[in-house]
Image (cartoon, rainbow, N blue to C red):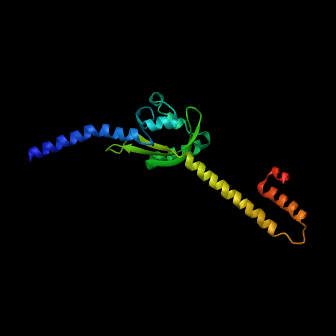
Amino acid sequence: VHHIESLLNDFKQKVNSNSGAFNNSILDEIKYGVYSVSTDFVQLFYVNPAILKLTEYSKEDFISNPKILHEIVHPEDLQVFKNAQKEFFEQGSYTLDLRIITKTNKIKWIHSKEILIKNNLGQAIRIDGMFRDVSKKKKIIENELKNDDDLLLHQEVLFKLSCLSSDFTFENKQQILLREAAKVLNAEWLGIW
């Protein structure tokens, strides 16, 4: 029995000693940016290459200032981010889509998640986070919404045109159509039709 316990302990030690290298190799290869910082964002425990590529900041930048992770939030998304941060310590996690500004001033949309890690006593000891670039997805959604808006505007103009009496001449209908389209689209360029 003692021999089996000894073998199990040896196995556990080997697994534990290798797990850090194993986890780091996996984290170094994934496309998601992964980081681990102290709860006060003073000490950086880990940052993977994907986060460096995504933000364009170096590992040294993050080591010297782990708060970069929050300082890169786009000003227009800052209030939403601050609200999520307020609830973070109560709920223990948050998930949020927001924009960041990279080191070279590119704006990127990210899907961000942070989890509060606690010790056995329930005390917060670190924050583990990840984010991924969702800029392409946001652009596709934005284009689809714009197309939907354009379609609705066209349908509204066509509906108003169809409601016109047949007593109007083509020129009268065209003038009314342009005036209604300008109201709907709020566009001055319709005068070129």
Q: Is residue 57 above or below residue 151?
A: above
At a point 85% along the width and 52% down the height, the residue shown is: 191
Q: Is residue 33 left or right of residue 185?
A: left
List x then y, in percent, for residue 81. Answer: 55, 44
List x then y, in percent, for residue 100. Answer: 56, 39
At a point 8% along the width and 48% down the height, the residue shown is: 1
Quadrant of the image containing the C terminus: bottom right
At a point 60% along the width and 48% down the height, the residue shown is: 139
List x then y, in percent, for residue 172. Answer: 90, 64
Q: Is residue 21 left or right of residue 84?
A: left
Q: In this view, does 135 lie above or below 173?
A: above
Asked whether 116 or 11 is in front, the reply is 11
Please indicate, yes or no, whether residue 72 appears anywhere in the rendered image. Answer: yes
At a point 25% along the width and 37% down the height, the residue shown is: 17
Please indicate, yes or no, whether residue 125 appears anywhere in the rendered image. Answer: no
Q: Is residue 167 left or right of residue 182?
A: right
